[in-house]
Image (spheres, helix red, strand yellow):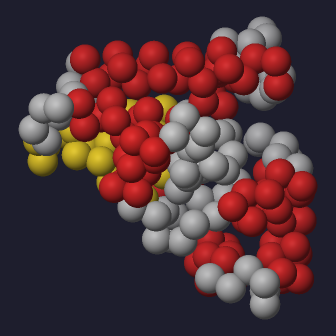
Amino acid sequence: MTSESPDLVVYLMRGLPSCGKSYTARVLAQAGGIVLETDEFFYTQVGDDPTKFDWSDDLLPQARQWNLDCFRKAMLHRISPIIIDRGNGRNRETWEYARLALTNGYCVELKEPDSPQWRAVRELLADKVANQAALDDWADRLAEMSRATHRVPTTTIKRWMAAWQLDLTVAQILSLGKLSTNFPGSTR
């Protein structure tokens, strides 16, 4: 592993759909950075209309690999910051981004949006059992809000809420790679 440079940063965005991850990612990238998002594959690499989200479950592994390859290229060009715009939880994909970043001398930080909807949802996630009805309402609202972009269904958002770990750290993500090849949680 190489030593980290404070001038080279990778932000792993965390949050649920339609909670402001992409907005925060674009703000972070304004200083000469780049935003990398697996879902971008379904706009630019599939279909003929780059404004249309051409989702296909069958192409998800290819989309993930495409985004990881874009990440490697960005690191080769020493772009900073690099923002990985996805849910970034306790899963193999997040572990891979963190591991590659550190191996290439980047500092890695987890970043969450600061939108009103994310603050409200995050507060409810602190006690999922007591707040289940409110979280179910939010899942419906977030699914509705995502229809214009990524069309994430309520059931998927509820599953991600159930698996959400508050205050996850980069060290916890990296420790998963040492423990198992079977990572918990969603990989999207």
Q: Nearer the viewer, residue 129 or 24?
A: 129
Is 91 on the left or on the right of 108, as rendered?
right
Where is residue 168? Give x, y as percent: 46, 64
Q: Residue furthest front?
A: 179
Where is residue 66? Give x, y as percent: 55, 16
Q: Which of 24 and 112 is in front in this view?
A: 112
Against 33, residue 16 (above or below) is: below
Is residue 161 in view from this perspective?
A: yes
Q: Residue at x 40, y 41 (%)?
A: 178
The quarter of the displayed image where residue 62 is located: top right
Q: Residue furthest top?
A: 48
Is 21 on the left or on the right of 100, as rendered?
right
Is 121 on the left or on the right of 107, as rendered?
right
Is residue 12 in view from this perspective?
A: no
The quarter of the displayed image where residue 99 is located: top left
Q: Which residue is drawn at 13% across and 32% down?
A: 2
Where is residue 46? Give x, y as percent: 74, 13
Which quarter of the rendering shows the N terminus? Answer: top left
Is 173 on the left or on the right of 116, as rendered?
left
Picture mark count: 0
Against 78, residue 174 (above or below) is: below
Q: Which residue is drawn at 62% across and 71% down?
A: 118
Which quarter of the rendering shows the C terminus? Answer: top right
The quarter of the displayed image where residue 54 is located: top right
Where is residue 15? Give x, y as percent: 59, 59
